[in-house]
Amino acid sequence: MTTPQVTTRSPLALLAAVASVAGGALLILLLQILPATSDISPVRRTISEYALSENKWIFDVAVLLVALGSAIGFGALIRRKHLPVLSAASVFCALWTVSLVVIVVFPKNNWAIGPSIGGTVHRIASVVAFVCLPLAVWFAAKAVFPSSRARRAVTRVLAVAALAWFGVILGAIVISMNGGEPWWRAIPLGLVERAMALTGLLALASLLIPARVVTAPVTEQAEALETAS
């Protein structure tokens, strides 16, 4: 016979995950004030533009920190049985994490000198990453916050907001295909991408910050021993 479930906590892995993600985000912000990359327009130029500068290594470290934090965070949720090993959330997180690594391996192409296979791979990986992160958070939110409707709602709203920013880009593409100006000029692409990335990372942080990871059933005997001690 079992008694009501008790909560176990594992804050260290989640704190490490959030710290890693935050560190990566701060490095990206730092790139905007460093001399070699401060002239890159955050309104018109995408984040990957930093990889075409001498500060490429900082960009790479930043992206890998975010990937590492994401893997640690979702790994902790899976390890504590809060998420199944194979679930929509874990699959989308894996795609998000792998896409970040691909983005580092295949830098943004300088389209001024023509297309390249690596540049195309980078673009595809960027799309997959920006779509999969909010989906991973959305599907994980219910399991992470089974009894907290407010926290679940906040996390899911942030995830939807991240997808909505991607919708702005899709809208610009549709307009461009119907005779409008090129989609990357029709909107402040750099600003939209940064807003999309920031919203997505906030959604991820909202998911991982809580210390409560999993509840586990205990037997009456174990409960009696705990009371006696």
Image: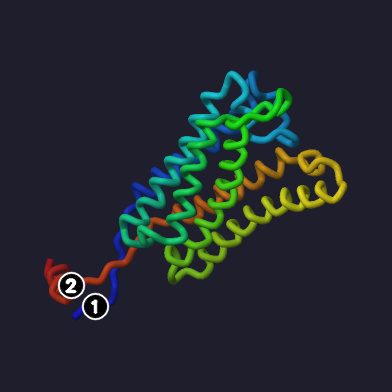
Secondary-structure class at tag 1: strand
Image x and y of residue 202, in percent: 56, 50
Residue at x 76%, y 53% (from the top left corner): 171
Residue at x 16%, y 68% (from the top left corner): 226
Label 1 crowd (10 A; few <14 / some 14-19 / many >=20): few
Instruction: Inspect the image, locate mark 1, and give the three-letter code of the amino acid beneath it.
Output: Thr
* Depicted 75 relative to depicted 103: above or below: below
Image x and y of residue 23, in percent: 49, 36
* Depicted 66 relative to depicted 104: above or below: below
Secondary-structure class at tag 2: helix
Task: Quadrant for residue 224, please give it.
Answer: bottom left
- State the CA–CA distance, disc 2 to disc 1: 8 Å
Image x and y of residue 178, in percent: 85, 51
Q: How is the image coloured?
A: rainbow
Quarter of the image for the C terminus: give it. Answer: bottom left
Q: How many marks?
A: 2
Q: Which residue is mark 2?
A: 223
Q: Which residue is mark 1?
A: 3
Q: Is residue 135 left or right of residue 35?
A: left
Instruction: Inspect the image, locate mark 2, and give the three-letter code of the amino acid beneath it.
Output: Glu
* Depicted 44 relative to depicted 85: above or below: above
Q: Which label lies toward us, 2 or 1?
A: 1
Residue at x 54%, y 31% (from the top left corner): 106
Q: From where the camera sits, is residue 23 visible?
A: no
Task: Quadrant for residue 54, please give it.
Answer: top right
